[in-house]
Image (cartoon, grey):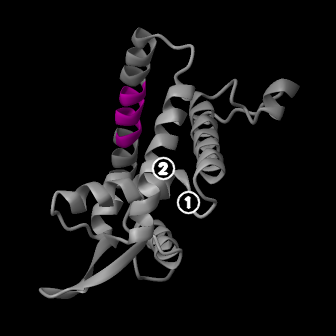
């Protein structure tokens, strides 16, 4: 494995994003999340973030279709770990956007439901996210957007393959001590 050390002062300042494609994608992802969070805080409410707003919309959509939503659904939708989802849901519940209701068939399951407060903010969140998407795509042609989707989907597929290979080649941890 090759280790690269950034020598160029410009790349050091940019955290090697000019040299490593993965670093550029990671930096872009963080910047997108921060920009969306800032937009929603300014246009809707500081109690919400982009992820919380999108999650609220997904729960509302599922509830409108008479589908129950559980924490494991959120984990799958957003491809995030259980602990992260737990923190997001606890915050949304604490801020009054959702409730978690026990399910008769399995007391361990908690169905997610949107509160009247969550419903009240939904249209404003959706409009803010739609404006964010429009602003984000400013200056790009439909062909460029289509090409970007193809490239990003291939990179996503490659990253998933790398992760799967690494998990397979990682030796199982033994309980034995040396």
Answer yes or no: do the residues labelled 1 and 2 have beta carbons within 8 Å?
yes
What mark, if any, has residue 65 been given in the picture? none
Q: Position of residue 167 (x, y in %)?
A: 37, 54
Q: Which residues are magenta?
A: 152-160
Q: Nearer the viewer, mark 1 or mark 2?
A: 2
What residue is disc 1 on? 48
Relative placement, left or right, of 175 versus 69 is right
Between the residue at mark 1 and the residue at mark 2, the CA separation in whole angstroms equals: 9 Å
Relative to 42, residue 12 above or below:
above
Q: Quadrant of the N terminus?
A: top right
Q: Position of residue 7 (x, y in %)?
A: 83, 27
In the image, farthest residue toward the right: 9
Whether residue 55 is visible to the viewer of this picture, yes or no, is yes
* Secondary element at tag 1: loop
What residue is disc 2 on? 125
Residue closer to the observer: 116 or 56? 116
């Amino acid at each position: 494995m090759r280790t690269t050390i950034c020598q160029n002062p410009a790349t050091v300042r940019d955290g090697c994003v000019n040299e490593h494609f993965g670093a550029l994608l990671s930096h872009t992802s963080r910047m997108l999340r921060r920009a969306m969070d800032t937009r929603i805080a300014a246009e809707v409410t500081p109690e919400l973030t982009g992820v919380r707003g999108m999650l609220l919309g997904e729960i509302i959509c599922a509830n409108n279709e008479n589908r129950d939503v559980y924490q494991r659904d959120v984990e799958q939708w957003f491809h995030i770990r259980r602990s992260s989802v737990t923190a997001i849901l606890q915050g949304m519940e604490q801020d009054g956007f959702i409730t978690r209701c026990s399910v008769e068939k399995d007391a361990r399951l908690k169905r997610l439901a949107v509160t009247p407060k969550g419903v009240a903010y939904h249209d404003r969140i959706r409009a803010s996210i739609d404006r964010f998407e429009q602003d984000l795509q400013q200056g790009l042609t439909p062909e460029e957007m289509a090409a970007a989707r193809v490239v990003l989907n291939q990179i996503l597929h490659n990253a998933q393959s790398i992760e799967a290979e690494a998990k397979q080649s990682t030796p199982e941890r033994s309980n034995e001590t040396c």
